[in-house]
Amino acid sequence: MKNIAIILASGTGERFGENVPKQFYQFEGKTLLEHAIDAFEKNKNIDEIILVTNPKFRDLAENILNKNEYKKITKVLNGGKTRVESSYIGTSEAPEEANVLIHDAVRAFVTQKIIDDNIEALKKYEAVGTAIESVDTIIQVDENNVITAIPPRKFLKRVQTPQSFRANLIKKAHELALKDENASFTDDCGLILRYNLAPIHIVDGDELNIKITHKNDLNIIKNMLG
């Protein structure tokens, strides 16, 4: 069964404060997008990469791909208005009998171990998420910013990507979401959970695999990389 990485690079990056989306920001001689693609390109278990990009910056994305001469990129698709729409567009291009690893391009420093652990877990589970322990206490507040609950920390984790699935399972989840007027999702595991399609197994993430949202996040990465 093929292992297909779907890299979502269609965000606008408004909070990053640059003229181009943050996935195109240069760090250590490469764009964040290149760093993300490199991780999957060099992984021996990944057979194919589908890139979902911001249509306004498609030319820039294709220039990056041409410069690097990636061997595993098979499709470049225009993304949607939301992350879930872009995920739907990407997964629609995967064959039914495949594993898909859906990854945010701005988690540019995903480790080989995380990718390998996702693929290994898919041998047993239909749905796999990546997460790390929450070292902070998390509170729940109401609309007036008043604490309503403090969930036990031992049950809380911070979600990362990739989130990985049997292609036919995540496609079914997206089809259900299209018919669900009340649907609102921030990630793909949320679709599986809402429609109770399969247990979602969690593999360990890594602090290096942070979602780069602000420029200061790059300073954190630089310190981690030494």
Image: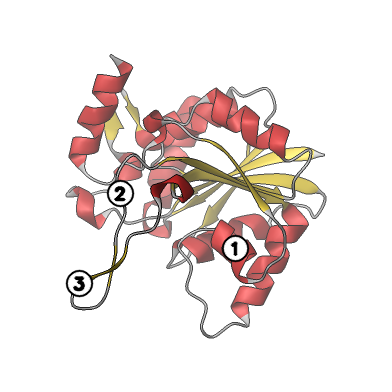
Q: Is residue 71 left or right of residue 217?
A: right
| Residue type at tag 3 | Val
Q: Quadrant of residue 28?
A: top left
| Foreground disc of the pair 3, 1 | 3
Q: Nearer the viewer, residue 5 or 34?
A: 5
Up-down: is 69 above or below 197? above
| Foreground disc of the pair 2, 1 | 2
Q: Quadrant of residue 117?
A: top right
Residue occupying the point 62% across, 24% down:
43
Q: Which mark is residue 88?
A: 1
For marks 3 and 1 on the same chain, the one whose residue lies earlier in the sequence: 1
Point out the residue furthest to the top here: 226
Residue occupying the point 67% across, 67% down:
173
For marks 3 and 2 on the same chain, the one whose residue lies earlier in the sequence: 2
Q: Which mark is residue 137?
A: 2
Q: Where's the N terminus, which quadrant?
A: top right
Q: Is residue 2 left or right of residue 90?
A: right
Residue 166: x and y, percent? 74, 51
| Residue type at tag 1 | Tyr
Up-down: is 46 above or below 160? above
Point out the residue furthest to the bottom here: 181
Q: Which mark is residue 146?
A: 3
Residue 101: x and y, percent? 62, 44
Residue occupying the point 20% across, 29% down:
219
Residue occupying the point 24% across, 57% down:
14
For marks 2 and 1 on the same chain, the one whose residue lies earlier in the sequence: 1
